[in-house]
Image (cartoon, rainbow, N blue to C red):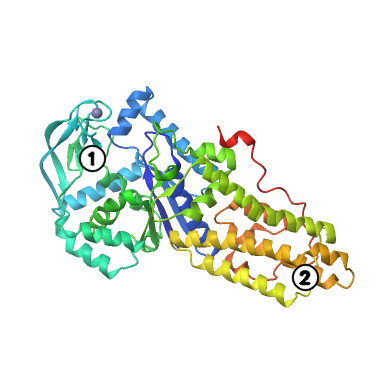
């Protein structure tokens, strides 16, 4: 049993390529676990509270409910078109979630770790929001209002983190696999060298309406983390196997939110008497080409919907899976299109040429072949490499390793065809009949093995190949990534083109 979560996203704007990135990776983890015979529960969703949402609703002229329903649908529809098999879509305005947030707040308040005190901050009257120094431009102005924020004092509730600092340091040191890659655990340990400031967890209702009311003071709503992070517990709260899910929970995230997830959240859980999440997987950012930050003004923002419309879902999924890293990766429509072409030359080419050869020399019937040693070795080699890659996927680096192993396997089989020249064997029949049969069987069985291993990353492409080979979807399991399982005598279907040529102007739009 594995419980996989993405962060919940802010729906004040439309979903962007970064949302697609994390959510695709979660889906790959889920599918791999399923293929290994493990049950999964996968959640993603939206955080519908806070001042930015409130401002976006006011600007839209829609009712709160209409606005939030529309936005949830936009996110869901992106995830559907990315073939994300989420089991639960989080919405923080749901009553069940609010109830659990209030339970957290009340219990921790009663234990004395929540205190009320004066808060002073930089407040932009235009945005009606507190700003951090880092939100301001070089003149100290709000970039949206070209105005200096004023210092505002207000009373708020704070969560005391410092009493838990030593415990958290110990927890990280005793669980070296907790935060992956380890580099980020070191970063968290560095943050824990200094005493932890109290975390502000409230906003007055007079200023922020969109939030969960504090159960012990209705003049306040809770602010960001006590609401958003609790989704990981509220999403499984009513499930009978919630303890088992929690013991095998994996939080996925970008590196910008490791502090709340690896400091605030484990401390909140500890204060509730709960265990920290089992594993935290962290990836870097997506940037525009040449590592330049994506921004509308530069015009290098990659729209996931446009990418899907151009190259389809699988090329984007495989691009992300191959390139995922703790470092920042550059993304543009151009390099995703190039990746699509690579997949066409690699997987697409292997599929088409293998099926064409079988059609030409065996009328599409898989031969009953006695494999040569060389052919048998090739099948053993690719199935070993792919099945061990599939069995070891527990983090982002291993997703990338699986993706690269797939590209590598296709290259090997493609060069095998070029080297063996089955068309030359066909000229020397009948004495080459056994050799030709062995070669054709090897090609078709390689395709089967590759398609099964491809499924978690590029499910549509995998299903198309398996459908051509007349293989049932129930056979998409790691157990079947073994050599020579393709049934002889099967009549395969006519192969369809997996990666059609793109319209010439599609990359220039
Ligand atoms: Zn402002």
- Residue 201 vs 68, above or below: the answer is below
Q: Is residue 184 left or right of residue 459?
A: left
Q: Residue at x 16, y 54 (%)?
A: 196
* Mark number, residue 134: 1
Q: Position of residue 266 (x, y in %)?
A: 26, 57
Q: How many marks?
A: 2
Whether disc 1's CB lies below 8 Å from ligand 1 is answered no
Q: Badge 1 local density, few (<14 within 10 Å), some, or many (20+)? A: few
The quadrant where residue 468 appears:
bottom right
Which residue corresponds to mark 2?
A: 438
* Residue 487 visible in the shown view: no
Q: Residue at x 35, y 67 (%)?
A: 177
Q: Secondary structure at mark 2?
A: helix
Q: Badge 2 local density, few (<14 within 10 Å), some, or many (20+)? A: many
Q: CB atoms at circles 2 and 1 under 8 Å apart? A: no
Q: Is residue 472 left or right of residue 157?
A: right
In the orientation shown, which residue stands out farthest toward the front? Answer: 290
In the orientation shown, which residue stands out farthest toward the top? Answer: 61
The quadrant where residue 447 appears:
bottom right
Q: Nearer the viewer, residue 251 or 339?
A: 339
| Quadrant including the C terminus | top right
- Residue 13 vs 89, above or below: the answer is above
* Residue 192 visible in the shown view: yes
Q: Nearer the viewer, residue 264 or 310?
A: 310
Q: Is residue 405 left or right of residue 416?
A: left
């Amino acid at each position: 049993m594995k419980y996989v979560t993405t962060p919940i996203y802010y729906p004040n704007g439309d979903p962007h390529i970064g949302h697609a990135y994390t959510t695709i990776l979660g889906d790959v983890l889920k599918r791999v676990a399923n293929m290994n015979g493990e049950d999964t529960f996968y959640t993603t969703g939206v955080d519908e509270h806070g001042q930015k949402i409130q401002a976006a609703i006011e600007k839209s002229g829609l009712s709160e409910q209409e606005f939030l329903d529309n936005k949830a649908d936009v996110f869901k529809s992106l995830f559907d078109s990315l073939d994300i098999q989420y089991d639960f879509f989080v919405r923080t305005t749901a009553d069940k979630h609010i109830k659990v947030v209030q339970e957290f707040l009340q219990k921790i308040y009663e234990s004395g770790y929540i205190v009320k005190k004066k808060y002073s901050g930089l407040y932009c009257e235009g945005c009606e929001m507190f700003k951090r120094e880092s939100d301001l431009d070089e003149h100290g102005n709000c970039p949206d209002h070209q105005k200096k924020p004023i210092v505002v004092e207000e009373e708020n509730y704070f969560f005391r983190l410092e009493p838990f600092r030593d415990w958290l340091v110990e927890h990280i040191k005793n669980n070296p696999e907790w935060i992956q890659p380890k580099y980020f655990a070191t970063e968290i340990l560095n943050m824990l060298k200094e005493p932890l400031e109290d975390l502000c967890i409230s906003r007055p209702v007079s200023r922020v309406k969109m939030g969960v009311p504090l159960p012990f003071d209705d003049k306040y709503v809770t602010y960001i983390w006590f609401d958003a992070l609790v989704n990981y517990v509220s999403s499984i709260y009513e499930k009978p196997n919630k303890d088992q899910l929690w013991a095998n929970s994996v939080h996925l995230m970008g590196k910008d939110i490791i502090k709340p997830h690896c400091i605030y959240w484990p401390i909140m859980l500890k204060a509730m008497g709960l265990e920290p999440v089992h594993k935290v997987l962290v990836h870097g950012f997506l940037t525009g080409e040449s590592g330049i930050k994506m921004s509308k003004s530069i015009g290098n923002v990659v729209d996931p919907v446009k990418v899907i419309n151009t190259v389809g879902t699988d090329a984007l999924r495989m691009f992300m899976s191959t390139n995922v890293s703790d470092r920042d990766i550059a993304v543009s429509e151009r390099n995703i299109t190039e990746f699509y072409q690579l997949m066409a030359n690699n997987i697409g080419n292997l599929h088409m040429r293998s099926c064409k050869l079988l059609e030409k020399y065996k009328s599409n019937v898989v031969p009953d072949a006695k494999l040569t040693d060389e052919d048998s070795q090739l099948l053993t080699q690719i199935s070993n490499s792919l099945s061990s890659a599939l069995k070891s996927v527990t983090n982002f680096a291993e997703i990338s390793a699986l993706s690269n192993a797939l590209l590598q396997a296709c290259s090997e089989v493609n060069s095998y065809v070029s080297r063996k020249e089955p068309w030359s064997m066909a000229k020397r029949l009948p004495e080459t009949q056994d050799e030709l049969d062995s070669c054709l069987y090897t090609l078709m069985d390689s395709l089967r093995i590759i398609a099964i291993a491809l499924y978690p990353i590029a499910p549509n492409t995998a299903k198309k190949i398996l459908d051509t080979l007349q293989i049932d979807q129930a056979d998409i399991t790691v157990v079947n990534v073994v050599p020579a399982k393709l049934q002889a005598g099967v009549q395969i279907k006519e192969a369809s083109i997996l990666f059609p040529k793109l319209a010439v102007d599609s990359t220039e739009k």
